[in-house]
Structure formats: C-alpha cells, structure tokens
Image (cartoon, grey):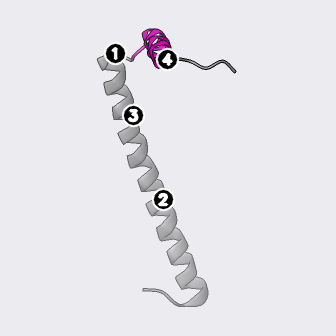
Amino acid sequence: MAKTSPAQFVQQVRSEAKKVSWPTRKETTVSTIMVFVMVALASIFFFVVDQLLSWGVKLVFGVGG
C-alpha cells in the first residue's frame, strides 16, 4: 500500500466530505421527535411487561414486594 502524505490525506478528506449529503433541519427535527416517541413507547411496553412478570412471580411463588 502506498504511503499518503499529510497534505494529500487532508485533500482526500475534504474531497470525501464534499460528497456527504447532510439532512435538512426538518428531517433532523422529525427524526428526533420519532426517536423520543419510540423511546416513550418502548419504556411503556417494558414497564407493562415488568409489572406482569412481577405479578406472575408473586402469584406463583408468593414472594415479592
């Protein structure tokens, strides 16, 4: 593999950075909102499952708070 000089490396990095398509502000906002919605739904789901498992353990073993 050929050695790359620091100047050539920086030039290649800048060239590749120009090819990146950055999301718009609206896309970023929508994605962020969707992440928060999915986190909320997942937390509710796992809370309900945890409560059901806790209830089942209490019912079967008669232990738990």
Q: How many marks?
A: 4
Instruction: Tell me which amino acid carries mark 4.
Output: Phe
Secondary structure category for the residue under label 1 = loop
Look at 47% across and 9% down and name the residue there: 15
Question: Which is the main secondary structure of the residues drawn in magenta?
Answer: helix
Q: Is 20 rendered above or below residue 57?
A: above
Pick whichever, 13 or 35, lies toward us: 13
Residue at the location (47% across, 69% down)? 51
**33 up-or-down from 60: above or below:** above
Query: Which residue is label 1 attached to?
Result: 24
Q: Distance between the residues labelled 2 and 4?
A: 48 Å
Comparing labels 4 and 3, the label whose residue is closer to the camera: 4
| Residue sitting at x 61%, y 20% | 3
Q: Name the residue under label 2.
A: 46
Residues under labels 2 and 1: Cα distance?
33 Å
Which residue matches tag 3? 34
Q: Mark 4 points at which residue?
A: 9
Question: Where's residue 41, x and y in %?
Answer: 43, 47
Residue furthest bottom as drawn:
62
Q: Distance between the residues labelled 3 and 1?
A: 15 Å
Disc 4 residue crowd, few under 14, some 14–19, many 20+, Cα 10 Å:
few
Of the two numbered discs 1 and 4 on the same chain, state the one appearing first in sequence: 4
Q: Which type of secondary structure does the marked residue at label 4 adopt? A: helix
Q: Which of marks 2 and 4 is nearer the N terminus?
A: 4
Say which amino acid is labelled 1. Answer: Thr
Mark 2 or mark 1: name the one nearer the start of the chain: 1
Q: Who's the residue at 34% across and 15% down the image?
A: 24
Instruction: Verify whether residue 42 appears in magenta.
Output: no
User: The disc labelled 3 sits on which kind of residue?
Assistant: Met
